[in-house]
Image (cartoon, rainbow, N blue to C red):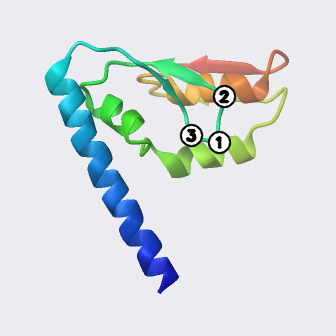
Amino acid sequence: MADALKSINQKVRNRLSGVAWRLRCAVNKDQVPVFSLPDSRVQIAYPLCSAVGRALYTRTFETAELSFVRRTLKSGDVFLDVGANCGVFSVTAADLVGPSGRVFSL
């Protein structure tokens, strides 16, 4: 029962975030906010009114993949981001590998 309520609560939150995103885009379609990535100190600026902007705003941007990267990378590692697009994985990796590691974005 608790899991079902948690699932419903998450769905309602996601829906409300989507509505808030649409309203913000309607008011200022050229906005480029700075997003804080979940479970990270990394921030990235990205146009709000785009598919990636919506996912960042609603905090649904490839959560499982970002979680994997956070669990796997450590200081000094090398990370290759093929198809880097907006660079979310690149900046997350750069924060994790630190100055002794390397990040290549293609």
Residue at 36 percent of width and 70 percent of height: 8
Alpha-carbon span between mark 2 and mark 1: 14 Å
Residue at 26 percent of width and 27 percent of height: 50
**Residue 85 placement (x, y as % from top left):** 41, 23
**Residue 52 placement (x, y as % from top left):** 34, 31
Residue under label 1 = 69
Alpha-carbon span between mark 2 and mark 3: 8 Å
Residue under label 3 = 38
Give the vertical position of 89 relative to 43 (above or below): below
Q: Amino acid at mark 2?
A: Arg
- What mark, if any, has residue 84 been given in the picture? none
Helix, strand or loop under label 1: helix
Query: Is 42 or 97 nearer to us in this picture?
Result: 42
Query: Is 83 or 50 nearer to us in this picture?
Result: 50
Q: Which label's residue is closer to the chain start, 3 or 1?
A: 3
The mark closer to the camera, 3 or 1, is 3
Residue under label 2 = 41
